[in-house]
Amino acid sequence: MFSIVEERRGDRIAVGTLARLSLGNRLTDSPAARMRAGADPAPGLSLVALENGEPVGTIRYWPVTVGAGVKAIQLGPVAIHPDRRGRGLSRILIRDSLARARSLGHRVVVLIGDPSIYGRYGFEPARPRGIVLPESEDLDRLQVLALAPGALDGLSGTVRPDTIPRLRAARTTA
Ligand SMILES: CC(C)(COP(=O)(O)OP(=O)(O)OC[C@H]1O[C@@H](n2cnc3c(N)ncnc32)[C@H](O)[C@@H]1OP(=O)(O)O)[C@@H](O)C(=O)NCCC(=O)NCCS
């Protein structure tokens, strides 16, 4: 029996293990990883799939900006334990978290991933819209989704980590 809950503090080690198991080096060495570096996950959107109380699936989102500072969130990683794949768990995690993101007021989601996986959720290639990454690696895997009508209209530019408020806060308290 599976359930989906918000990630709890005690899930962090299991979630890290799941993500490493699923993504290998790309968890820490990839354009997506560099976008997450130094950021905290977007609040309320880190979900885990539990089986008998143990995390067997994870999804997280990260704050980013597009172009001239338009707020967005970056989906990923999404990882399912190898023994639990093919049962619709990632579909539930992705759909549930996108619904939560919409209800929290997020308007744009980006991700770097396989288009054959994410097209079914409404993601489309970002490059034709002029939405790009700071580096050329993985540019063709960058995808984008509007959570609100018109959210992608006229949106273009580079996706960047949105870590400035946290850095400012750290300086203020230093
Ligand atoms: C990719 C991954 C998250 C899929 O999880 P899962 O729980 O097995 O997927 P689901 O059973 O929920 O499948 C949902 C849909 O995605 C499709 N799908 C699953 N894995 C896929 C893949 N590798 N390529 C294309 N489609 C895939 C399924 O066929 C299913 O399609 P449907 O909605 O038409 O029935 C999982 O295999 C995994 O953790 N892989 C390693 C980490 C990874 O690659 N993460 C994604 C980074 S881009």
Image (cartoon, grey):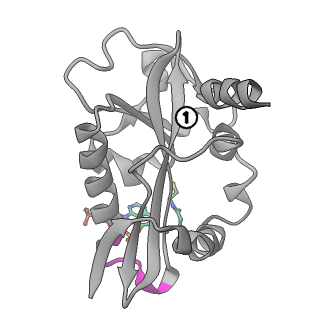
Q: Magenta residues, as a range?
A: 83-89
Residue 164, percent across and down?
A: 65, 24
Q: Residue furthest left?
A: 149
* Above or below: residue 71 compared with residue 94: above
38 is within the stretch colored magenta: no
Residue 135 visible (yes or no): no
Q: Is residue 46 visible?
A: yes
Q: Which residue is mark 1?
A: 140
Tell me the quarter of the picture where residue 12 sits: bottom right
Residue ID at (34%, 68%) = 5
- Assess whether residue 85 is covered by the magenta stretch: yes
Name the kind of residue labelled 1 in the image. Answer: Asp
Disc 1 crowd rating (10 Å Cα; few below 14, some 14-19, many 20+) is some
Q: Residue furthest front?
A: 173
Placement of the N terminus among the 4 image quadrants: bottom left
Locate the C terminus by quadrant.
top right
